[in-house]
Amino acid sequence: MTVTLHRGDLPAGLRFGDTVAIDTETMGLSPPRDRLCLVQISSGDGNAHVVQLRLGAYGAPNLRALLGDPNVTKLFHFARFDVAALRFYLGILASPIWCTKIASKLARTYTDRHGLKDLCKELLGVELSKQVQSSDWGADTLTEEQINYAGSDVIYLHRLQAELERMLQREDRLHLAQAAFAFLPIRSELDLGGWQDLDIFAH
């Protein structure tokens, strides 16, 4: 795995194909409070690009163009959070969306373990380290461990997508997953609007 760090934006001319894996690192779990620090991207070739964003410097025109491209599927794990963070800080609604966490919950009903580490271990035989998951992503200088961790969160998503899509088709639930993916932009808007802890479909 090669992880390339970019400061402020992606370089011009990079191409990621028609499906790009994306993840974010933030200062916490509340987008309005906890700023966006990193955006990680992979084309599925085993390599990753990490964009480090400074406080208040969210121009990133090349990154925005990629996120806003309607011809490129954005592949996430727990898209609900990442889409909201990207929308809040970059002003871009990343779509269309494919989410491995939602796919896992619909396909792998025999377990309640749907984290990225669990998926990689079961479906790919890959052990992910989460040692630096909770660290200071807003630091001016990131450690090599942080950069490699950030990259590892996207390089396996294409392979997971293929495995989960196969399972969803087998269980005749792919249409449910696709409908859930299509709702994610609205879900992120609800989260940002203050309905993150309320089930609006409940009685």
Image (cartoon, rainbow, N blue to C red):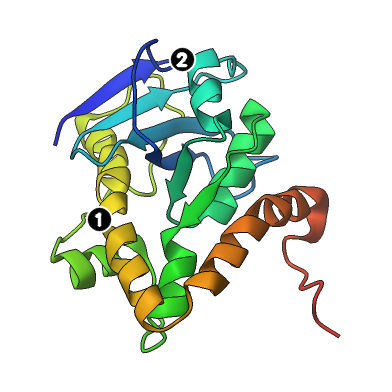
For disc 2, the marked residue is 8
Q: How many marks?
A: 2
State which quadrant residue 180 falls in: bottom right
User: Is 37 positioned to the left or the right of 189 in the image?
Assistant: left
For disc 1, the marked residue is 159
Q: Quadrant of the N terminus?
A: top left
Q: Looking at the picture, does residue 103 appear above or below residue 83?
A: below
User: Is residue 113 in view from this perspective?
Assistant: no
SS for callout 1 = helix
User: Is residue 59 in view from this perspective?
Assistant: yes
Q: Position of residue 29 (x, y in %)?
A: 57, 50
Tag 2: amino acid: Gly
Q: Looking at the image, is mark 2 or mark 1 earlier in the sequence?
A: 2
Q: Looking at the picture, does residue 34 appear above or below residue 184?
A: above
Q: Looking at the picture, does residue 157 appear above or below residue 66?
A: below
Q: Residue at x 55, y 23 (%)?
A: 64
